[in-house]
Amino acid sequence: MLEIHNLCVHYGDATAVRDLSLTLGDGEILTLVGPTGCGKTSVLRTVAGLIQPAAGEIRIGKLRIDSKRNVPPEKRHVGLVFQDFALFPHLNVEDNIAFRLKDRAPAERWLKQLGLEQHRHAMPDTLSGGQKQRVALARALAHAPALLLLDEPLASLDAALKAQLRWEIRQALKAAGVPAIWVTHDQTEALSVGDRMGIMCDGRLEQIDEPDACFRKPASRFVAHFLGDAAFLPGELGSTHVHTALGDAPIGDVAHSPDTRVDVLVRPDDLSVTAANDGNGHIEWSRYEGETRLYGVRLNSGAQLRVRTNHEHQLDDGAAVDTRICAGHALALFEPERPTGSA
Amino acid sequence: MTRQPWSYVPAALIAAAALAPVLVLVYMSIGADLLFDGRTFEIVLNTVLLAVLTVTGAVLIGVPLAVVTTYADLPFRRVWVALLAAPLAIPSYLGAFAFFAAFGPGGEIETLTGIATPRAEGLIGASLVMTLYTYPFVLVSTRAALQSLDANVVDAARTLGLTLPAAMFRIVLPRAANGIAAGALLVALYTLSDFATPAIMHLDTFTRMIYVDYHAFGLDSAALMSLQLLALVVIVLFFESRIRVRRERPGRVLQLPLSRAVNSTAFALAGVVVLAAIVLPVAVFGAWLVREGVVGFEPRYALNSAYAALLAALGAVIVALPVAYAASAGWFGRLCERITYLGFGIPGIVMGTALLYLGLRLPLLYQTLALLVLAYILRFLPLAVGAVRSSTERVENNLVGAARSLGATPGEVFRRVSLPLILPGIVAAAALVFLEAMRELPATLLLRPTGFDTLATYLWRVYEAGHLGRGAVPALALVLVSGVALVLMLSGEARRRRLTAG
């Protein structure tokens, strides 16, 4: 449906996107995530036709766009949902949704589907944030785009609304069968709504894969840190396991040469703590988080690790403990860093 | 993306036109004797004294009224605010005519009631009239500042041991100081620019002497004084540019429980001000109407005023559109916009002098309506740009992007999204310029084609001829126009507040 090959985008002298390639299948939802200024919004605006690419090629269905051939936004059939919703302030909800429709049936369908019927005559500035977001989505979907782009659609809403709306939007996109690129800076959002996710940093696509693959096997330390708490333990490869100071972990079917030194990615839920006077560290702090409890453990070696346990588990600050790797699945391995590596 | 916005070319041309009057004045005064004699000193002194007294008076009236109308629980508060802001819309020359006619031996007050009053003239008379018609600048800007202050801060100060009056002085006033200063500088600017009030009160300020000198000695001497006056204006503008009105996050507005004594004092002050600034002139003009009727007045004058003002309104809007667009496109556009604001600082009499000189050099323009309309446009362009810009800013890039992503062509986007959004701003801009031009006096006096009288110039002519009583109809008509302007101003204010709140 959408193919992007070696895309570069410049703003004046600044480079926003460097050599980015990706493809999007029919009906697929791709989330693009990364820190502020990583270039994810520039990708969207380029695909929408609001920015001209500096190099590379974009194919939307039969359309081809590159630095010389431009297709104006209105010819692309690409819908766009903005962070600030961009509702036309002089039109009511119904007229916003049916902006360019001759047959208003699709507008009616989406008014119903997104629960906006009782607000159909309301003006945009009287709506709440969540309602505005639904109107913006309904407007984009009612115009039957070949592809929908969502630019941080939930960023201006409060947390409770976010969780609910993100699932509603995903359902609506799937019901419409429209492929979508969904840009966000919230990694939880990216992990939960995307069929696949792309992680961007400094204009480059660091990794693009299914969310659990990105989380389990991050392509870089940046991705590992961005998607969640991450620590790196030095280890040595054996034939089936990697050996670390905190025990062994399976390595799966990665091709490797034995006796290689590696860094092992451990997340808080890959570790366990038990009270033990002759253990390898002590509890520095603990944080009760409802379903789980998070411990800060200071190892005798001086390094600090975070360990997540069941909420019933309780250890006092200062308690001597033994920390072990308890993961049953393969852990991601990285080339060792210079001697100053963490843990 | 480095393409220059289309609006830069017309915006640059318009900025150049706005600069022209200043350049003309500089050119005219090159070679003129820069004599700084006793007479010049007296004029500077009078001008500065008038400004200082007026600013003092405006602050003394404006600030207490702002505090009371913002924080106290007055009955009919909105009516009071509208009434107290009203003198802003009335040109001060109407007040000056009324005070001139009402006070003194043989004045309207003595004729009607038999009570002898001192003549309203000179420095005191002029300061009094100017104060009555400019204090709303301070009132409005101070109210805006006070409203943006969060009441919690005052409450916090009181929990820390300050009494309420102490909290007002130590917590509220310092934060409102910039707002008060902004209003005071507008008062100073208006006072420096005003021609008719000092002229009617026989106070030799720059504006009056420019007009007198033009008739007595010709343009060169008038041009030199115009430049000297502009120097004073620039000083005021410099201070104004240094003021940053701080915006705090809007919070709860303070409610003050005022004692009955304070409340009735405030009511009395507000009553006296409204009585003097609005009721007295209308009563005087009414008395004229009863006594003299409509003798000498021709409907043609009103039509002339409306015709010239309409042309100015259309011209100003057409010119303001590219400037407003350019201003949101980049730094160069903002510079052009800044330059068009020059018109606001150039007193009408100075603008008239500069364009008159231009007219004498370009026979095509001399004694034409076009030259007068050009003066109106240059002078009131800032009003038009401001009003148009506040609406073009509503058409954010995202709205255009959204419309185009839904399949609309650029033409359709303009017709269906941009135009409906900016149209109210365009109408408001045209109305503002129209109403200002209707009431303009000094530039009209200098630039009107022979035999072309407007409401304001007719009023001036009957004053010069000593038959002020015959000015009843134009004076009342101008009060009416001012009333319409006030309604427009207040509704525009309300609309802006709604927009920023939403």
Image: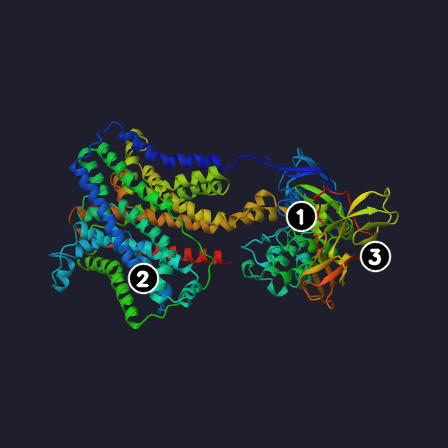
Please report whichever mark, 3 or 1, sits nearer to the chain's N-terminal start.
Answer: 1
Q: Which mark is residue B172?
A: none
Q: Which residue is outermost to the top?
A: B31
Asked if one can make out residue B476 in the rendered structure from this viewpoint, the answer is no
Q: Residues within 10 Å of mark 3 (few under 14, many from 20)?
A: few
Q: Which mark's residue is nearer the viewer, 2 or 3?
A: 3
- Mark 2 — residue? B65
- Residue drawn at (19%, 55%) of the image: B99
Is B270 displayed left or right of B382 in the figure? left
- Which chain is indicated by disc 1? A
Amino acid type for the residue under numbered disc 2: Leu
Which image quarter: residue B266? bottom left
Which image quarter: residue B255? bottom left
Label 1 SS = loop
Label 2 SS = helix
- Mark 1 — residue? A34
From what the image shows, is residue B43 above or below residue A156?
A: above
From what the image shows, is residue A170 above or below residue B389?
A: below
Residue A252, x across and y down, in percent? 86, 50
Which quadrant, please, contains the N terminus of chain A? top right
- Mark 3 — residue? A328
- Cα separation, mark 3 vs mark 1, equals 29 Å
Of residues B395 and B69, the one drawn nearer to the viewer in this rendering: B69
Is A266 displayed left or right of B332 in the figure? right
Q: Which residue is outermost to the right?
A: A239
Q: How many marks?
A: 3
Give the colouring mode of the picture: rainbow
Amino acid type for the residue under numbered disc 3: Gly
Q: Residues within 10 Å of mark 2 (few under 14, many from 20)?
A: many
